Image (cartoon, grey):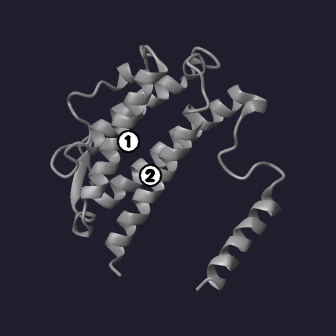
Amino acid sequence: MNIGNEYLKVVQERFESVKNLGDNTINQLSEEDVHWKVNDTSNSIAIIVKHLNGNMISRWSDLLTSDGEKPFRNREQEFEDDISSKQEMIIMWEKGWNAVLSTLNELVDQDLLKSITIRGEEHTVLEAIERQVAHYAYHVGQIVYIGKQLKDESWESLSIPKGKSEQYLQQKLNKHRAQNNGH
């Protein structure tokens, strides 16, 4: 087993898991929900998605050959909610994630220790990936939190619902036992 290839597989799965949390939240929200914000200094889900899109396109385009902060990026403009619809927001969301996942899919283990820059600061590709995992998980966590607050009682849990931990564990153990007995 090659540790670099295993890392790339695991980190791709991690990014996909983070994306799925966002997908499953966004799917529960209305047009109005994605633009809601608690106050003027907060970000709506639409703004968070727009910021993620800008970051993802900038960081992952030409990852190995150009600075991660591209000249075309206007970070300040990412925090203006000029998204016309939930559908437009979803297109931005998918475009950003496509940049991340397709670039990750093209990387090979030898790329992980290559040196790249983000805002002129040197990082290994491995460091840059970890930086983005943390950044995206942070913002998707915000999306989930906002969505959960907005949907309240109608929220469809994305993980183990409160009070269901033991039931969940038993289902997992039973599934594992059935798989092992079948082999």
Establish if 59 lies above or below 74: below
Q: Residue at x 61, y 37 (%)?
A: 144
- The residue under label 1 is 97
Q: Amino acid at mark 1?
A: Trp
Which numbered disc, 2 or 1, marks the residue that appears first in the sequence?
Answer: 2
Rendered location of residue 173, percent (x, y)? 72, 73
Q: Is residue 124 visible?
A: no
Foreground residue among 153 and 8: 153
Quarter of image, res 21? top right
Label 1 crowd bin: few (<14), some (14–19), many (20+), radius 10 Å: many
Q: Is residue 123 left or right of residue 168?
A: left
Q: Is residue 92 visible?
A: yes
Foreground residue among 148 and 56: 148
Q: Residue at x 37, y 33 (%)?
A: 53
Count the labels in the image: 2
How far apart marks 2 and 1 lie (CA) works out to 9 Å
Label 2 crowd bin: few (<14), some (14–19), many (20+), radius 10 Å: many
Rendered location of residue 56, percent (x, y)? 34, 39
The reply to whether callout 2 and callout 1 are in contact (CB within 8 Å) is yes
Establish if 18 lies above or below 13: above
Rendered location of residue 119, percent (x, y)? 27, 40
Q: Residue furthest left?
A: 65
Looking at the rendered structure, which numbered label has been put on residue 15?
2
Secondary element at tag 1:
helix
